Amino acid sequence: MRFFPVGYGNCLTVTVSEQGLGLSLLFLFRFMCPPLFIPWSQIASVKEGRFLFVQHVVVQPANHWSRIKLYGAVAERVLAVSKGRIRGAT
């Protein structure tokens, strides 16, 4: 089974802290979907990527097939905070 990427645009709030990565949907779309917090210890890798001229970061949770691709300032923040906290941060 193949899953297609989902783009949340401005409906997703991403929080990057010293403890981990938080994801939360806008209130209108949050029904049955509580905020998600992933501690750095549960993230297998954070890798930089580029598609054409757009840089992004791919976050791979440990023991899970899904990936989270982030762009812009939040991607830079994830890279900066994840360095030294997980082995796969590049």
Image (cartoon, rainbow, N blue to C red):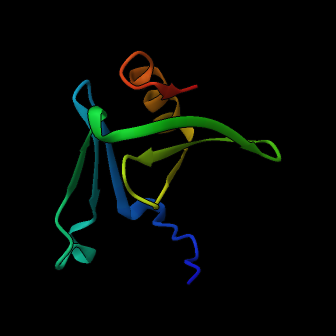
Q: Which residue sits furthest right?
A: 52
Vertical comparison of 35 with 81: above or below: below
Q: Which residue sits furthest bottom?
A: 1
Q: Which residue sits furthest top?
A: 84
| Residue at image point 58% right, 76% down | 4
Q: Is residue 44 left or right of residue 35?
A: right
Vertical comparison of 36 with 2: above or below: above
Q: Residue 48's x, y, as percent?
A: 63, 35
| Residue at image point 22% right, 72% down | 30
Vertical comparison of 2 with 68: above or below: below
User: How many callouts does the rendering have?
Assistant: 0
Comparing 25 with 82, the one in front is: 82
Q: Residue 21's x, y, as percent?
A: 30, 40
Q: Residue 38's x, y, as percent?
A: 26, 45
Q: Which quadrant: the C terminus?
A: top right
Q: Which quadrant: the N terminus?
A: bottom right
Comparing 71 with 37, the one in front is: 37
Q: Is residue 59 left or right of residue 31?
A: right
Occupied quadrant, residue 78: top left
Vertical comparison of 65 with 44: above or below: below
| Residue at image point 59% right, 80% down | 2
Q: Residue 14's x, y, as percent?
A: 34, 47
